[in-house]
Image (cartoon, rainbow, N blue to C red):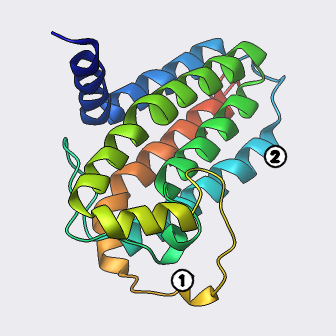
Amino acid sequence: MSLAMNNADLRALAFKYRGGIWTLLYLVVYFLAEPGRGYTSIGLLLVVLGQLVRFWAAGTIRKYRGESVKAEQLITWGPYGLVRNPLYIGNGLIGLGWSLMSGSMLALGVFLLIFVLLYGMLIVPWEEKYLREKFPEEYSYYEKQTGRFIPRVPMHLSRVQGPFDLSILWASEKYSLGITVLGTLILLFKGSELW
């Protein structure tokens, strides 16, 4: 088996199990947390901002849950008109918020390292390869117009306008919202007398 095949297999596995990996990453942050030392207000703000970004992104696309990459069409509006990976940016903000709430510099470092490895080196390249193959010309143009993780202000604001469906948002994001809220509450009360 070639190295390229191993990379492809690893990327496919990372994509397939991204939810479970995210849960493990949260547990690392939780167990490294040092109650009373965190930046709770800033952390909470980042968690809320991250979830709002996820809401905007999830309501813009039709389907994104699943164990394999799929796309019926290339979404280039809404948050996708600014950046190619808004769902992962939302995850990054949530994870950064949790890390700051934890008060542990080690937790922050581990989170940043795993986030870069998981999304920057495994999942996003896997998704981009799929999109390049499925929408070759359209994706090539789109890739030049938007940043991977750093938003670019579009030349025309019409790029952020487009369909948004609240029912799709709720159907696809209610599980993630529950996990985000629960994880945040558990971190907030870790070490308190309430447990």
Residue 164 visible somewhere in the drawing: yes
Dot 1 crowding, Cα within 10 Å, few <14, some 14–19, many 20+: some
Q: Disc number at residue 170?
A: none
Dot 2 crowding, Cα within 10 Å, few <14, some 14–19, many 20+: few
Does dot 1 land on a helix, a strand or a loop?
helix
| 92 left or right, relative to 177 | right
Closer-to-camera residue (52/79): 79
Q: Which residue is mark 2?
A: 41
Q: Position of residue 6 (x, y in %)?
A: 25, 16
Q: Cα distance, mark 1 to mark 2?
A: 33 Å
- N-terminal-most mark, 1 or 2: 2
Say if 121 sits above or below 174 in the image: above
Q: Amino acid at mark 2?
A: Ser
Q: Residue at x 49, y 54 (%)?
A: 85
Closer-to-camera residue (57/44): 57
Say if 165 sits above or below 174 in the image: below
| 1 left or right, relative to 175 | left
Closer-to-camera residue (93/80): 80
Q: Residue at x 45, y 68 (%)?
A: 141
| 42 left or right, relative to 30 | right
| 114 left or right, relative to 93 | left
Q: Which residue is most to the top?
A: 1
Q: Position of residue 173 (x, y in %)?
A: 37, 59
Q: Disc number at residue 159?
A: 1
Q: Amino acid at mark 1?
A: Arg
